[in-house]
Image (cartoon, helix red, strand yellow):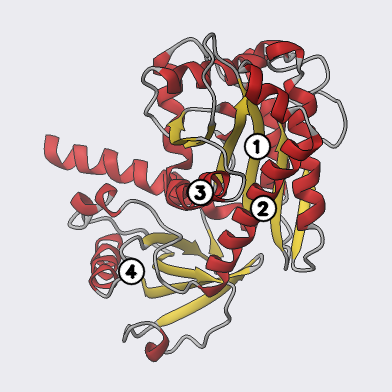
Amino acid sequence: MKTTLKYIIVLRTVIFITSLTLSADLHAQQDKFVVVLDAGHGGGDHGNLGNGYKEKNIALNVTLEVGKALEKHKDIKVIYTRKTDVFVELYERANIANKADADLFVSIHCNAHSSQAYGTETFVLGEKNTGRNFEVAKHENEVIFLEDNYQENYQGFNPSSPESTIAIGIEQEVYVEQSIVLARKIEDNFINQAKRKSRGLKQASLLVIRNTYMPSVLVEVGFLTNKKEGAYLNTKKGQSKMATSIRDAILDYKKEIDLNVGSGLLGIDPELTEALEDVPLTYDGVLFKVQIAASSKNLEPQSYNFKGLRGISKEKVGSLYKYYYGNTSDLAEARQLQQQAKEKGYTTCFVVGYKDGKRIDISKL
């Protein structure tokens, strides 16, 4: 009984994660690839003031330059959380992205440290809050104290508590893989194009990407507290170099999405569901499918396009076509179909649910 209960608890967790992809049912869809750009801080929140420079100004300059370059592409729509020196609550930044049903969320910041540390870092959401990662998360999250009703908006979240920061990681876990792809491209461009030192890709529990239901990253373009790097980032040339690196990474990511069908870009860690396939759960009126791929390509749902799998269906969501395998009211059977899809190479496929032809929040079943 305890073993079954454990499986059901884990299953509920996974179902909750996969349900976060359902914002498409709540908002009008965009045919374009939607990128939300978030300039960190603003208004009365200056961010860090290393060497007298204002993080909020540099972050905004870089963000606007990234956006201006992306807007030249007709198939991309750019939305800004702020375009001027105003304060925007962290939760509202996520809301802007969710309401837009965005394909990407990119938050741009400048770093600070008590030493002369330097270099770029790009963060994705996660639980690895040890040492320096936790300090970054704590610093970026403490801005909530400038907000009205922060205790209500963040449900008792405490930036100084490791337990709080660990707890927020699960909500966006379904998108971590895609976020890592983008983050890696950004850091590679900082190295190869901008010729900057990269401190690598990191995971931390950052509130600004807590509730964004799409691939999301927080980019630290360098340390204002480092005398040389701070001066570089305060120049138009430095800001332009960083903006170009971020822009090119987003375009490269989009290109990979456009070419991708079933390579596993959209999905969750298969280890999360490995132990759940034999749990018998059925629901009247609910149909389960296995999402195996997402791409901007509009393919015929035929077996020859999907490694021999039959019973393929598709759905247009925003700028992407999502492809599904199988159709059953038995969740255990859906898990078996998921395993079959994995064996065909769709290693990050996952189960979704529909009722009366509409995608539903299966965590509430």
Q: Earlier in the sequence, mark 2 or mark 3?
A: 2
Please state if 272 lies on the left or on the right of 93 as rendered. Answer: left
Q: Which residue is mark 2?
A: 102
Q: Residue at x 52, y 35 (%)?
A: 197
**Discs 2/3, front:** 3
The residues tagged by marks 4 and 3 sit, at their Cα atoms, a distance apart of 27 Å
Residue 123 picture location, percent across and down: 51, 35
Q: Which residue is mark 3?
A: 188
Using the image, determine if residue 320 lies above or below residue 251: below
User: The residue tagged with tag 4: helix, strand or loop?
Assistant: loop
Asked if labels 4 and 2 touch by Cβ distance under 8 angstroms, the answer is: no
Q: Which residue is mark 1?
A: 107
**Residue kind at label 4, given as amino acid type:** Tyr
**Residue kind at label 2, given as amino acid type:** Ala
The residues tagged by marks 2 and 3 sit, at their Cα atoms, a distance apart of 24 Å
Res 346 label: 4
Q: Earlier in the sequence, mark 2 or mark 4?
A: 2
Q: Earlier in the sequence, mark 4 or mark 3?
A: 3
